Amino acid sequence: MYCFFEDAGHYRAGRILSKADTSLQLELQSGRRVKIKQAACLLEFSGPEAEAFLAQAQSQAEALDPDFLWQCAPQDDFAFTDFAQEVYGAGASVLDQASLALA
């Protein structure tokens, strides 16, 4: 399993090495290991591998128009996962959700 998370203003993905009640230990593509809070994990996915997932999500995000998305977004606070269901339909994949977060 892999985790898509936000770290210091950057979106990253890593392979989940272990889970605890409130934290995850991840291995990044570079081999570096990091510990994050469970709440920082935005999405969990089984494949593709972390770097390929980020590359595909970034490519898909570049096709989205951020200005149009903000016009369509709810006025109140919203979860990007819920908004992805509106943009991509009820079957929005984890990749679709991540691309929306990146956009």
Image (tube, rainbow, N blue to C red):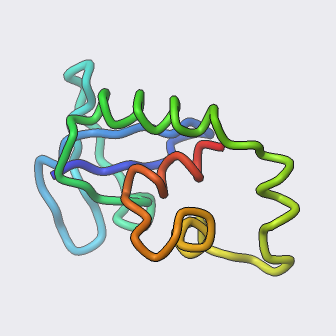
Which residue: 12% across, 47% down?
Answer: 17
Which residue: 59% across, 52% down?
Answer: 100
The foreground one among 102 and 61 is 61
- Can you give x and y, in whole percent of width and height, for residue 80 in the image? 59, 65
Does 98 sit left or right of 100 as displayed? left
Quadrant hosting residue 62: top right
Which residue: 46% across, 76% down?
Answer: 90
Position of residue 41 relative to residue 78, above or below, is above
The foreground one among 77 and 60 is 60
- Can you give x and y, in whole percent of width and height, for residue 38 in the image? 34, 65
Query: Hey, which residue is sitting farthest left in the picture?
Result: 17
Position of residue 9 relative to residue 28, above or below, is below
Which residue: 48% across, 50% down?
Answer: 98
Does 25 sit left or right of 69 as displayed? left
Quadrant hosting residue 74: bottom right
- Can you give x and y, in whole percent of width and height, for residue 24 in the image? 25, 56
Query: Hey, which residue is sitting farthest bottom in the picture?
Result: 76
Quadrant hosting residue 21: bottom left
Quarter of the image that includes the C terminus: top right
The foreground one among 9 and 2 is 2
Tally of marks: 0
